[in-house]
Amino acid sequence: MSKTADKTTDTIENAAFPTFDPSKVTDQFRAVAEKGVEQSKEAFSKLKTGAETTQKALESTVETAMTAGNELSLKTIAALRANAEADFSHLEALVGAKSLSEVVELQTVFLRKRVEMSVEQAKDIQAVTAKAAEEVSKPVKDAFEKVFKELKAA
């Protein structure tokens, strides 16, 4: 057993324990802090760029929405005008009718034309609305996709 005791004593005497150097800790802490600050600056810069891109997209969206709203208003006014003209024309025709059968025939033709006209107007307004929705959402959609793509890359 004396060999084991001698070996343990020899190992303990020859062992080197690491020394604590406060200047190295300070340097390491400073390096970590500087790296964190740099990463924060990069993240802020990307966030700022994304926010500016989004703001431009929103401004574009508002302009597009106003244009689309004006176009939709013009289509609606045109439809109302066409309806009013059709109503007055029908009224004039009814006033000039000579018999009850002519009134019934005029009314039947008028109602059929009105239904066809209403369907056509609804299709036109639906097309304008769909186009407007697509145009209004496109800038914002593109901006968000770009921002998310940049964030994923980072």
Image (tube, rainbow, N blue to C red):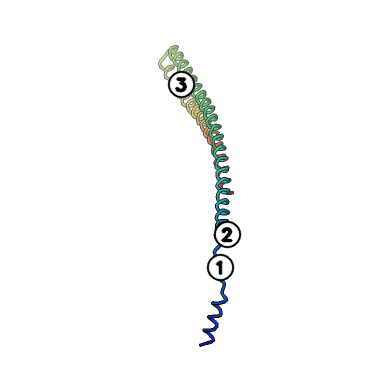
Would you identify the image quadrant in which residue 11 lies?
Answer: bottom right
- For this view, does 14 lie left or right of residue 117? right
Q: CA distance from mark 3 to mark 1?
A: 102 Å
Which mark is on residue 24? 2
Q: Residue 110 — which label?
A: 3
x and y percent of residue 16 in the render?
Answer: 57, 72
At 54% from the left and 27% from the top, the residue drawn is 67
Q: What secondary structure is marked by label 1?
A: loop
Residue drawn at 56 percent across, 48 percent down: 37
Image: 56 above or below 106: below
- SS assignment at label 2: helix
Q: Amino acid at mark 1?
A: Pro
Q: Which residue is mark 1?
A: 18
Examine the rendering and report whether any part of residue 33 can be seen: yes
Q: Where does residue 127 sit, x and y in percent of width and height? A: 53, 31
Say above or below: 136 vs 99.
below
Q: Amino acid at mark 3?
A: Phe
Amino acid identity at mark 2: Lys
Residue depth check, mark 3 versus mark 1: number of the one nearer the observer: 1
